[in-house]
Image (cartoon, grey):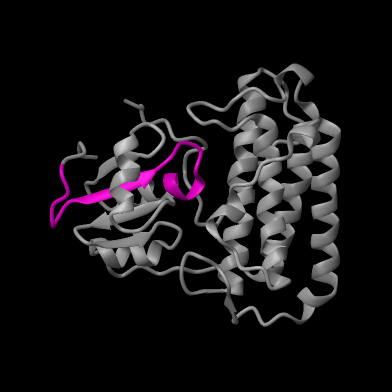
Amino acid sequence: MTTASPLTSNEIRVYWQPGCTSCLRTKEFLTRHGIPFASRNVLGDDKAFEELAHFGLRQVPIVTMGENWANGQVLADVAKLVGVHGLSFKMLTVAELRQRLGKVMDAALRFYRQLPEDKLHALLPNRPRSYTDLMYHIFNNVDAFLEEKDGIPLVFDSYNRFPAPDANSREAVLAYCLDVQERFNQWFAGPGARLDWSARADVYYGEQTQHQFFERTMWHSGQHTRQLQWVLEGLNIPVDGPLGPETWKDLPMPEKVWDDEKIA
């Protein structure tokens, strides 16, 4: 990883923030392929957002190279930008993704119920997101997936919602999460059984099929559930039914649970 310097025609930059699943995955992808890059943490450096404004963007992860950029949500686009060739991206079946997402949602519910009351609104490292916000986000990802099926396009802010101040108690958040889980199961038993998974999804980060969107929803919620399990472990609370590596096998997820890059 290189140190950030003025924009040049050949410097690769990654704009990211702590706790962002796709940001961590993007940086791991570049490191794994030996691609040096300048790390631009938008929460740790106000100038980073100013640089993104040059591209008309205010979202992460973004990878730039000169005047060109790629959304880190789509590793195929990142690979094309930085010159990584010969990659093959395979997906699990829809049925397998559904089974694993169900397992993830059940686990998140167990984990959240284990959090002590006085820790519900503690903050994650270097990120203004509480443990309760994290739980809400896990299920909001699934909610946003369902919204797209109702004709509501997925935009960047779809993933940046928080529970209302008067609805962020454990009981209120659990009620929301259980409602999302129930609606997800009902959708799969109804319209989801007839969906053309090769059709294009209406998402902000490029041309994606419904199958790709569902895969992203599954591992996105999954990575944040890994983080919730990690929180319990850090609190020395025995985890009720921890999720093992078999849950993440063959998914395009980050290797790490949390980004441990030091923030200047």
Residue furthest to the left in view is 9
Front-most of 53 and 154? 53
Is 16 inside the magenta-drawn segment? yes
Front-most of 204 and 209? 204
Quadrant position of the N terminus in the picture = top left
In this rendering, position of residue 222 left or right of residue 48 = right
Is 151 inside the magenta-drawn segment? no
Residue 31 visible in image: no
The x and y percentages for residue 21 are 51, 46
Residue 254 visible in image: yes
Quarter location, residue 170:
top right
Quadrant position of the C terminus in the picture = top left
Residue at point 51%, 65% (across, down):
204
The x and y percentages for residue 121 are 68, 25
Residue at point 38%, 66% (across, down):
76
In this rendering, position of residue 254 left or right of residue 33 = right
The x and y percentages for residue 70 are 34, 62
Magenta residues, as a range? Answer: 6-24
Residue at point 27%, 56% (across, down):
64
The x and y percentages for residue 41 are 36, 38
Q: Is residue 40 above or below residue 66?
A: above
What is the total number of numbered labels drawn onto the structure image? Answer: 0
In this rendering, position of residue 13 left or right of residue 196 = left
Q: Is residue 47 above or below residue 155?
A: above
